[in-house]
Image (spheres, rainbow, N blue to C red):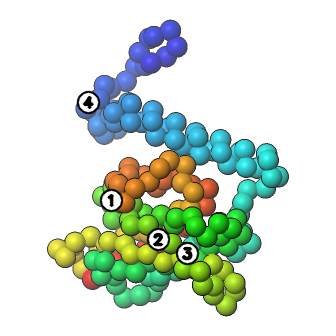
Amino acid sequence: MRSGGQPVAGPSQGEPNPLGMIAENPKKTEYADMQHFRAISIAMLIVAATGRLAIAQDGGISVRVTTPTPDKQCVKVADIVGGFAIDGAAQDLTQTVWVVVYPVGTGAFWVQDRAYFTGATDTEKRQLWEGTAIFGTPSTPNAFPFQVRAFILPVMGLSTGQQLERWPAARYESPPIIVRHC
């Protein structure tokens, strides 16, 4: 709705839009837009308060997924997921690392069991974390692609098994890696 209570022109929920796509639920879209706005606002506050965004020197990445590796032949239905965090992302080792798996092309982003910092460091003194992720089911076709990302300090609360419509916003986010089911 526009200010003044006048409806915005366009298809209503469930009707095709000019591109032939079904219109989303406006309340869901409005909520998602508000979450995105909130994430941007938090990032702007961090920059205003500290003079910089808490990004590490490792190519601008403060958290990364390193296991499974994209060059690994394939992942099992339940497989180990791990990585490292540096700079601000690893200051509080009691933080949960949330792993989210996206079966490519499905539109569903699945929050996995919590991953935790192990207390160990690698040769570059980066804090290591580890958890388990689910990649499809036993009937998932071989070579089916999945994207995997890690998030620390998400903007909205996450819970194991939660299905999202997009990647969550977080203070620290890894770039995606692509793995394939076997």
* Disc 1/disc 3 C-alpha distance (Å): 20 Å
Q: Quadrant of the C terminus?
A: bottom left
Q: Which residue is mark 1?
A: 161
Callout 1: 10 Å neighbours few (<14), some, many (20+)?
few
Q: Earlier in the sequence, mark 1 or mark 3?
A: 3
Q: Earlier in the sequence, mark 1 or mark 2?
A: 2
Q: Could you say whether the residue bearing mark 1 is in a helix, strand or loop?
A: loop
Question: What amino acid does circle 2 point to?
Answer: Ala
Tell which of 90 and 26 is nearer to you.
Answer: 90
Residue 177 picture location, percent across and down:
48, 73
Q: Is residue 86 visible?
A: yes
Label ID, residue 15:
4
Question: What amino acid does circle 3 point to?
Answer: Phe
Q: Which residue is mark 2?
A: 115
Extreme residue in the right direction: 51
Q: Residue at x 41, y 15 (%)?
A: 7
Residue 150 picture location, percent across and down:
51, 66
Q: Do the numbered discs 2 and 4 sit on residues whose CB atoms are within 8 Å?
A: no
Extreme residue in the bottom direction: 123
Residue 2 picture location, percent across and down:
49, 16
Q: Which residue is mark 3?
A: 117
With 101 as the anchor, is 137 left or right in this view?
left
Q: Could you say whether the residue bearing mark 4 is in a helix, strand or loop?
A: loop
Callout 2: 10 Å neighbours few (<14), some, many (20+)?
many
Instruction: Give the quadrant of residue 72.
Output: bottom left
